[in-house]
Image (cartoon, rainbow, N blue to C red):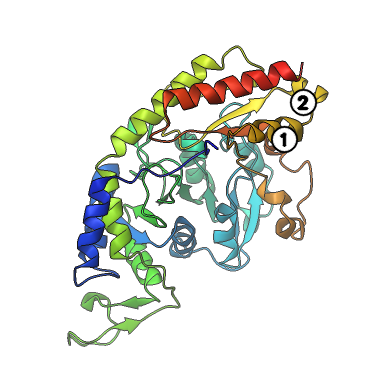
Amino acid sequence: MIPYGRQSIGRQDIKNLNKVLKSNWLTQGPLVEKFEREICKFVGAKYAVATNSASSALHISCLALGLKSNQYFWTVPNSFVASANCGLHCKAKVDFVDIDKDTWNLSPEILKNKLKKIKNKKKIPKIIIPVHFSGQSTEQKEIKNLSKKYKFKILEDASHSLGGMYKGEKIGSCKWSDVTVFSFHPVKTITTAEGGMAVTNNKKIYKELLKLRNNGITKDIGDFEKKIKSIWYYEQQSLGFNYRMNELEASLGLTQLKRIKKFIKERNLISKRYMSLLKDTPLQLPSIRRYNYSTFHLFVVRFKSKLLKKYSYDKFFNYIRKLGVGINLHYLPIHLQPYFRNLGFKENYCVNAEQFSKEAISLPIYYGLKIKEQKKVVKIIKDTFNNFK
């Protein structure tokens, strides 16, 4: 089986992990701080806070941005559930903005129209969480312009797109957002096994993120409520969480980061090859805006609707899987998951995302995917179409 994604672990990764295992630090130590600094340097942000997952980073980012009980936050249905769960953990109310038919990212036009229709100011979202689907940036400039008018905060879920660019800026520079979150899950651009990172240019948000990551505790003398300078002293100032990254994960992240340009370059070469080899098939291929540089965390294609009128999605999906290609679906619409149906969401709420989920498949793409393996994937897909004529 050729998987849709996988990590690439090199000798240097293993060598440095062994050093950590023999060191005095296993939990949070100097390598975590170094990894945070290196990520800041790489994306052009001022501050970074490493966490044990992107889900954790999204959660504390919502809290640091002031999301409170019964306030609204909006995100897209075409994402992993963490993009919505993060705000629900703050006891806030979720709503969804449908996706663009071409980029499969949040549609700025639909967002604009949805905001215009709000009559009750209390229902204006406190936070918008756009998701960079598959590695391509959302239309951040347009979303930022809307935030100035409607006074909402922007939390970029860039779990797919560390190393990508938008309008000449690195994703994560926070030029068009308040906080950006990255994921280091094994199938992402780089991995720390599990792990995440929140970056920001706002010092107040940064300090809040640090506390929330560490059980609400601060050891910063300048932030103490009690006038004391003893080195043993610390204060819990809020109800936080144990969301810390450890030294082993940070070590892996540091060595992986040194290879990130190589990883993304190869992903783009693989995607270019797919574009060429699949151009004459009954598939809709990804549409990348000219001002975007995608990391191609995923390579998603869609069966054209005419084809699925004749044969079911299941029939295609199962047949391709049986032949050894580990295709996947990203994503089932969040709002149609049982938990969200219980909140009142139903079919036809986000029609673009719902239609997308009935037609989309993710093809194998990862650093180390061999040309012969990729050609095998393409051949199996083409043979499948021929067999179903």
The quadrant in which residue 286 appears is top right
Tell me if label 2 and label 1 are in contact, CB under 8 Å: yes
Which image quarter holds the N terminus?
Answer: top right
**Looking at the image, is 69 positioned above or below residue 42?**
below
Q: Residue at x 20, y 67 (%)?
A: 22
**Looking at the image, is 357 positioned above or below residue 243?**
above
Give the mark nearest the N terminus, 2 or 1.
2
Tell me where residue 369 appears, x and y as whole percent: 43, 31
Q: Is residue 223 left or right of residue 113?
A: left
Q: Residue at x 79, y 26 (%)?
A: 311
Return the residue at label 2.
308
Tell me where residue 355 appears, x and y as whole percent: 72, 34
As helix, strand or loop, the secondary structure at mark 2 comes to helix
**Looking at the image, is 58 positioned above or below residue 326?**
below
Tell me where residue 161 appears, x and y as whole percent: 42, 40
Q: Residue at x 34, y 29 (%)?
A: 265
Between 56 and 75, the residue placed more toward the observer is 56
Between 103 and 307, the residue placed more toward the observer is 307
Residue 85, can we see it? yes
Return the residue at label 1.
358
* C-alpha gap between disc 2 and disc 1: 9 Å
Which image quarter holds the C terminus?
Answer: top right
The quadrant in which residue 359 appears is top right
Amino acid at the residue labelled 1: Lys
